Image (cartoon, grey):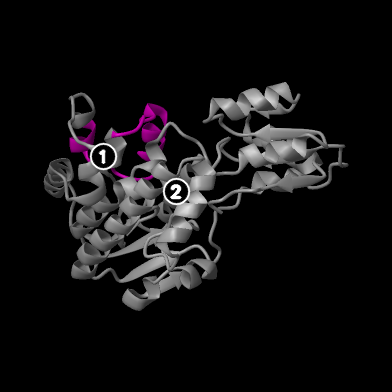
Amino acid sequence: MLSLGLVDSRAISKHNSGTEKHVREIIKRLSARYKLYYLPTTHAFLSEISEEQLKEIKKYAKVPSFFESLLDKKVSTSLFRELFTFSPLSKELLDGYRKEVDEVDFAYIPHNYRIQLMSSILLSSIGNKYGMLLMTDPHNSLLEKESFLNCVNVWSKVWFSKTSAIKFCSMQRVQNMVFLTKTLKRKPSFIAVMNNGAINYTNLPKHFNVKVLSPPHAFNSLALKYRNFDKEDYVVFLGRINTAKGANEALEVGKYVKLKMIGYSEQEFIAKEAKRLGIEVIENVSEGEKFEILSKAKALILPSHQE
């Protein structure tokens, strides 16, 4: 049986947004065909880990005990190191994993989040070959063709700060160069993307064997139960409630029609304004409840700057 090393941190996160669900679904699917090792990146130590999700992942893949031993210790790292270097922590993880993991046929990175990018590239050396899945959001993608000025203009509108936008876009460009230099040396067998737009938007095909996944996303069959509800008189916004997802712009729609917003409130000023306008914000919702609300809505609003 082919063995795969899944290099990732999102599946064991306390967050439960689209990205985390997507990676968890990938792991469940692959476990039916391959022997899996789950290899957390350094990003796991920069975010909140869910013990429940870790326990769930262990049903489908072997997790090195070395990683779990580090959870009880105070681990030191920094955002700068993780963004631009093979940090001491990532090297420590690599050494620890190699002592427990038999040589894997393939290292697969199911979601290459920028904060875990360098760590992912390093840990992928455990495999004889490796591939990457890059979630290339517009204005936030690796090797994007977009000009620096356009990047600044977009993020200035999102964050209402040109200074923050310049810092962010500069960081992106530097990390893109580091990514390209380090990845070309390791020659991934493929880089997978979610759609043709990602190929057209980036310079990835110039340097790598790029494949478009089909189908690109996990599908929850539970949604089929909710296809035949009669529509009610409201529209719905679905996504994290922040400016990058355009939640503040969705509020404008809520001034004229009944609006329901489903998602985690990440920016308090948007939630406060929604409350002032009488807009319902639904943060804690089950999958069934979410599908029911969506199915009854007359329209979906998605003013995101990232999708």
Residue name at image x 17 percent, y 43 percent: 93
Quadrant where the image shows the N terminus: bottom left
Q: Label 1 amino acid?
A: Leu
Q: Is residue 136 visible?
A: no
Residue name at image x 41 percent, y 65 percent: 144
Quarter of image, res 241: top right
- Disc 1 element: helix
Q: Which residues are magenta?
A: 46-68
The Cα–Cα distance between marks 2 and 1, rounded to whole angstroms, is 23 Å
Quadrant where the image shows the C terminus: bottom right
Which residue is labeled 1 in the image? 79
Q: Label 2 amino acid?
A: Val
Residue 243 horizontal side relative to residue 281, left or right: left
Task: Specify which label sits upstream in the sequence, 2 or 1.
Answer: 2
Which residue is labeled 2 in the image? 23
Q: Position of residue 207 (x, y in %)?
A: 32, 75
For label 2, count other residues whose C-alpha is less than 10 Å away and answer few (under 14), some (14-19) or many (20+): many
144 shown above or below 68: below
Q: Position of residue 4 (x, y in %)?
A: 30, 57
Asked whether 14 or 245 is in front, the reply is 245
Residue 67 horizontal side relative to residue 21, left or right: left
Residue name at image x 49 percent, y 40 percent: 159
112 shown above or below 186: above
Q: Position of residue 184 (x, y in %)?
A: 23, 70
Is 58 within the magenta? yes
Asked whether 77 or 166 is in front, the reply is 166
70 shown above or below 223: above
